[in-house]
Image (cartoon, rainbow, N blue to C red):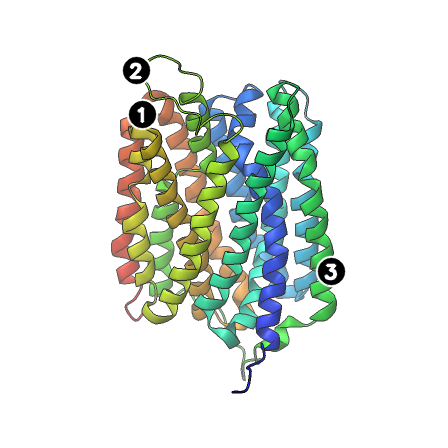
Amino acid sequence: MKKKNLSNAMIFIILFGIVSLFSDMTHEGASSIRGAYLALLGASAGTIGFISGLGELVGYSMRYVFGKITDKTHKYWSMTIFGYILDIIAVPALAFVSEGGWVMACALLIIQRMGKAIKKPAKDTIMSFAASQEGAGKSFGIQELLDQIGAFLGPVLLYLVMLSKTSGTTFEIYRTCFAILAVPGAITIIMLFVTKHKFPNPEHFEPEPKEYVPFKMKKSFIYYIVGISLFSFGFIDYSLIIMHVSIHFTSIASGLYETSSIINSETVPLLYAGAMLIDAVAALFFGYMYDKKGVKALVISTIISAPFSLFVFGFNSVPAVLFGIALWGVGMGAQESILKAAVTSVVPKTSRATGYGIFEMSFGIFWFLGSWLLGVLYDVSIPLMIGISIIAQLLAIPFYFMSTKKA
């Protein structure tokens, strides 16, 4: 039987996935300790929620601007490379923040998100060209799988660093962790240039349209934007989750709460690693499901993941927290793969970066508002925070169904 060779499009998807793997090792490794680090530097829960949300607001809302620039200039690689460099450099720079310097740390996190805003429309558009040959759901699912393998390895790397650091304060150990992340960051940039060298014109993967088709906001697209915005509003940022877990389960020593060696300062990165591993599997699974079922796949994933906040914040139990974080990973993986695949199938090639920008701008605005509000509510009423989180996500489901109707 003749062995089937990989197409150039699939080779490109895999290479770009490897770039994402090392990139996610860098910034998702940082994310695994970001909330705890900000708390250590003196930031409050409200501040952490605000900064996390603001970072997502910058990272998503500015994508509209850079998406328009990308469509106008067609400088796909230039925008991607510049954004990656800014994104990567900001992470190890956190190692130079002094004690009590939470303002500087927050500024670096915003810079990192700005880098992501610059690169994402161009990167996703480049990926969509190759995905047009291989199937959008499958292609973005494969990329997200590799992406999240990196997101798994990053926190594991930091866990090993923490184990090896037998001396020094918690602050010094965290600084060492951020410095170590410069290694996968450097590999990211190298692999990015290797991929560019091999595929200098990825837009050739997708045939040019016979005539120019302007971008139009179809009703189905608008419904989908409303649905994903409600989802992002209720989807609590991981920084608040890990702050709750690291403080709630390690600083309380009374018999009223369950404490466990499973959750302590050294093993905090492993929680995020586990969530990213589940994210990876969910992305591939729901990506394939999207190619067969459309956005109904997101309805299923939302039903599964919506109650995560109840288990994370509502129980003083380590098993419940672990289960809640697993559900969070399912939701994260599904929206990452399906979100991108949906835009590929709806928006024409000539204005796809703009389509990504509009879509993700809405996602980011509501992520910001949700993160800020839910972060404030954490200090006021955790049950109310849980209720709003779950209800907002479930309210997205009718809009997902409406988005499947013809415009």
Query: Is any part of residue 288 visible from this angle?
Result: yes
Q: Residue at x 45, y 24 (%)?
A: 45
**Quarter of image, res 75:** bottom right
Instruction: Give the amino acid type for the residue marked by disc 2 in the picture.
Output: Leu
Other-residue count near label 1 (Cα within 10 Å), few / some / many at <14 / 14–19 / ≥20: some
Other-residue count near label 2 (Cα within 10 Å), few / some / many at <14 / 14–19 / ≥20: few
Front position among marks 2 and 3 = 2
* Residue assigned mark 2: 256
Locate residue 194, reporting x and y percent.
73, 63
Instruction: Give the amino acid type for the residue marked by disc 1 in the picture.
Output: Asn
Contact between marks 2 and 1 (CB within 8 A): the answer is: yes
Which residue is nearer to you in this view: 265 or 216?
265
Locate residue 338, reporting x and y percent.
41, 60
Q: Disc number at residue 193?
A: 3
- Of callouts 3 and 1, the N-terminal one: 3
Q: Residue at x 45, y 58 (%)?
A: 337
- Of callouts 2 and 1, the N-terminal one: 2
Taking the image as shown, residue 366 lies to the left or right of residue 99, namely left
* Residue assigned mark 1: 316
